[in-house]
């Protein structure tokens, strides 16, 4: 059974800092991995999608990497801003259960002034 | 604007009173699904649909029904809601079954008393 873990569960950093969020999964047989952010009272916003054949994806200040063989992904946020405060979730599509996303429990990020 | 729209956003109901949460997407996506999010349990899939008239159970389908009569709509039906169905519900869609980005609605917070 695929399990997805995110560490740390919560993180507080001062504005301007570069930071890394971690996501690990137990089974490397995945189609892709997707990073989302969730704001209180709002839905999930897709940030980056990495296919299993890719090593990384970039969007603005965000860079996500994927090491499928070791079951790890990182989300790098450059020059963090208070508006980045949210819960960040990673999710994988496993080849054995391609009908669904398997989510991690998230990292709650707070960027302080 | 490409989006997934859920209604209602908030709902308080009583045990046993049938309700429907609607979900509509305007991206002509084939694949749609429902998730529920609970503290400590993360997001879990309830039902999914690969296309019109094709639906199947996810991880936690008990107490729920779905239908997919049109490509754009995928309502979630609770025939006899119970307090353990109090949760935050999300509808999601993607262009294809795998390899494509998932888009989520804003969520429906349901309380069953």
Image: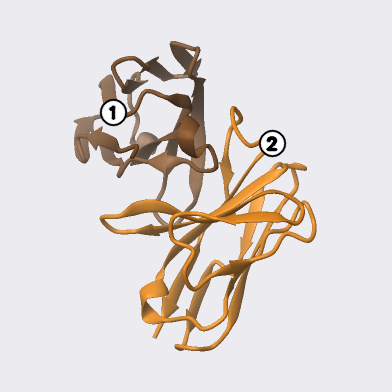
Q: How is the image coloured?
A: by chain
- Label 1 sits on a secondary structure element that is strand
Q: Is residue B53 above or below residue B12?
A: above
In the figure, the shade used to draw chain B is orange
Q: Residue B92: image x %, image y %? A: 58, 48
The chain drawn brown is chain what? A
Q: Chain of mark 1?
A: A
Label 1 Cα neighbours within 10 Å, binned few <14 / some 14-19 / many ≥20: many
Q: Residue B45: image x %, image y %? A: 47, 53
Which disc, if any, is residue A81?
Answer: none
* Residue position for label 2: B95
- Label 2 sits on a secondary structure element that is loop
Question: A53 and B21: which one is in front?
Answer: A53
Question: A59 and B15: which one is in front?
Answer: B15
Q: Is residue A24 above or below residue A102?
A: above
Q: Residue B14: image x %, image y %? A: 46, 88
* Residue position for label 1: A24
In the displayed structure image, the side of residue A112 where residue B91 appears, left or right: right
Quarter of the image for the C terminus of chain A: give it: top left
Question: What is the CA distance from the residue labelled 2 to the residue labelled 1?
Answer: 26 Å
Look at 50% across and 12% down and name the residue there.
A53
In the displayed structure image, the side of residue A103 where residue B12 appears, left or right: right
Q: Is residue B46 above or below residue B111?
A: above
Residue B101 in view here = yes
Q: Are marks 2 and 1 in contact (CB under 8 Å)?
A: no
């Amino acid at each position: 059974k695929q399990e997805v873990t995110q560490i740390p569960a919560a993180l507080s950093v001062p504005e301007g800092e570069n930071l890394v969020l971690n996501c690990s999964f137990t089974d490397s047989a995945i189609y892709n991995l997707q990073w989302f952010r969730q704001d209180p009272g709002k839905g999930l916003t897709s940030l980056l999608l990495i296919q299993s054949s890719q090593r990384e994806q970039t969007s603005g200040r965000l860079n996500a990497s994927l090491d499928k063989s070791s079951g790890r992904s990182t989300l790098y946020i450059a020059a963090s801003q208070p508006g980045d405060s949210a819960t960040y979730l990673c999710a994988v599509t496993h080849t054995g259960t391609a009908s669904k996303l398997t989510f991690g429990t998230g990292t709650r990020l707070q960027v302080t002034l | 604007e490409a989006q997934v729209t859920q209604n209602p956003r908030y709902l308080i109901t009583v045990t046993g009173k049938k309700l429907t949460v609607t979900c509509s997407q305007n991206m002509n996506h084939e694949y749609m699904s429902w998730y529920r999010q609970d503290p400590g349990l993360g997001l879990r899939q309830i039902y999914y649909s690969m296309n019109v008239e094709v639906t199947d159970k996810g991880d936690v389908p008990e107490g729920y029904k779905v239908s997919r009569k049109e490509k754009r709509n995928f309502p979630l039906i609770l025939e006899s809601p119970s307090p353990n169905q109090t949760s935050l519900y999300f509808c999601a869609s993607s262009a294809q079954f795998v390899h494509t980005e998932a888009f989520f609605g804003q969520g429906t917070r349901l309380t069953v008393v």
